[in-house]
Every structure is written in structure tokens, then in C-alpha cells.
Amino acid sequence: MSGAKPALVVVPTFNERDNLPVLIDGLLQIPSLSVLVVDDGSPDGTGNVADALAREHPDRISVLHRTGRPGLGLSYIDGLRHALTTGVPLVCQMDADLSHSPADLPRLLAAAEHADLVIGSRYVAGGRIRNWPLHRRLLSAFANRYIRAITGLGIRDGTSGFRCWRREALEQIPFDRILSDSYAFLVELAWETASRGSRIAEVPITFVERRQGVSKLSALTLVESAKLPWRLASRGRLR
């Protein structure tokens, strides 16, 4: 990626002590890329692991320790806001559980030359899902169709957390009015972006079910995700 624009990847963590070093190793192979780890008070010591990695690579890794109310959406908001203060032209986000491959990130960065938000998508041509049971595949596919039908959000994978933003588009997001947490947060952010006329593109990725640890998907997350499209539709259906 010779001549690539500088980019910062925001990685929220909660109990990812074993996965984080593997992910960081992959990300550091990409030139012009730095990483912000946003640890949500992990009791397994992930924050300490992140601090050690930052000491080893002080020019490329930084750590934000959250002490307020926990939650994936809140972690992302804090991380994305912090990323905007760095002045980098591209801000990315990805999960720490190794479900998103650093090898896919250069394609998102390249697509950001012509889009304001690039989504790493499981549901466009070339996208793949590995190691998911059938019920998870069906649930995810239904959720994305449900979101599109109610909100008019014209993207195939609104629940993907693998994204790259141009800073100008990210600066327009009204973070103070974002109400969702967990995976519903991702849909709300995409809707806010689309509602401002920003250009959204999707590139195929291979999504791999987490290798270690426990999935953070809960019944409460599913309920929140079911309610969100109706809240967004009340603000005005996208066309």
C-alpha cells in the first residue's frame, strides 16, 4: 500500500486477552496504519496486554481505558471520538475476536478513496461466513432484510462491525443522539450516515466465528436490535 493515506483502527475489547496480540500482529503488517485499543475494563487483564503492546510499539498503538458505563456502542463512541482528535483522514473499526481478518482491511482502505463509509460485508458477492451454525446464518440474514425493509437502508450488511470511514463523514455523526448499544449501534450509525447523503460502499470479507472466548450476543441484544429499525423509521424512511 505504497502512498496509502494514514489510517487509525479502533478496536474495542472486553475479555480478549488471548486474541488481541494476534490481531495486533496482523494489523501492524499494514503500512501507514495505527491502532487504538478501547478496553472496557476487562476483568481478564486485556487492558494490561494492550498497555504492554503499546509500550512495545509506541508510535503505532495507543490504549484508551474506559471507566464509565460499559457497552460496545459506548466503547465505539469514545474510540471514534478520540480518533477524530488525531487528524487521520481514515478511521476504521473492527472486532478484536479475530472474526475480522486484517488481510481484508486494505480493500476497505482502497474503497474509501471513492466512498465516505466502507462496510466489510458478508452479504455481497464474494463475502463469506465460516464456522457459523445454520441458525446463526438464518438469524443474521433475516435481521439484515428486516432492517432494509423497515428503514429503507440500502446496504446488505448493516450489522457488520468491520468498517472504514472518511473523517469528514464521521465528523457529521451526532454521537450525542446515538441511543443504541451492542450491534444495534452499528445499524444506527449506518442509518445516520446514509441520512446525510454520504456515499456508502460494501466490499466482500470473510467472517470467521470467534476462535477463542465466548460470544457476547445476548437476548437483550436481540430485543434491542428488533426495536431499533422502528425507531429509525420514525425519524424518516430512507429512499
Image (cartoon, rainbow, N blue to C red):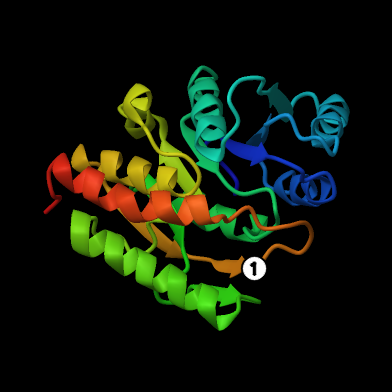
Is residue 6 visible to the viewer in this orientation of the structure? Answer: no
Screen quadrant of the C terminus: bottom left
Tell me which residue sits at (16%, 39%) in the image: 235
Q: Give the answer, above or below, for where 37 lies relative to 27.
A: above
Quadrant position of residue 173: top left
Q: Is residue 210 left or right of residue 90?
A: right
Give the left or right position of residue 157, taking residue 172 as reference: right
Disc 1 secondary structure class: strand
Q: Position of residue 107 (x, y in %)?
A: 51, 57
User: Which residue, given by chain and number where applicable, does mark 1 sit on?
Assistant: 208
As shown in the figure, which amino acid type bears the numbered disc 1? Val
- Residue 92 rendering spot, x and y as whole percentages: 52, 41
In terms of image quadrants, where is residue 175?
top left
Instruction: Give the x, y percent position of residue 201.
Output: 34, 55
Label 1, residues with CA under 10 Å away: few <14, some 14-19, many ≥20: some
Answer above or below: position of 21 versus 90: below
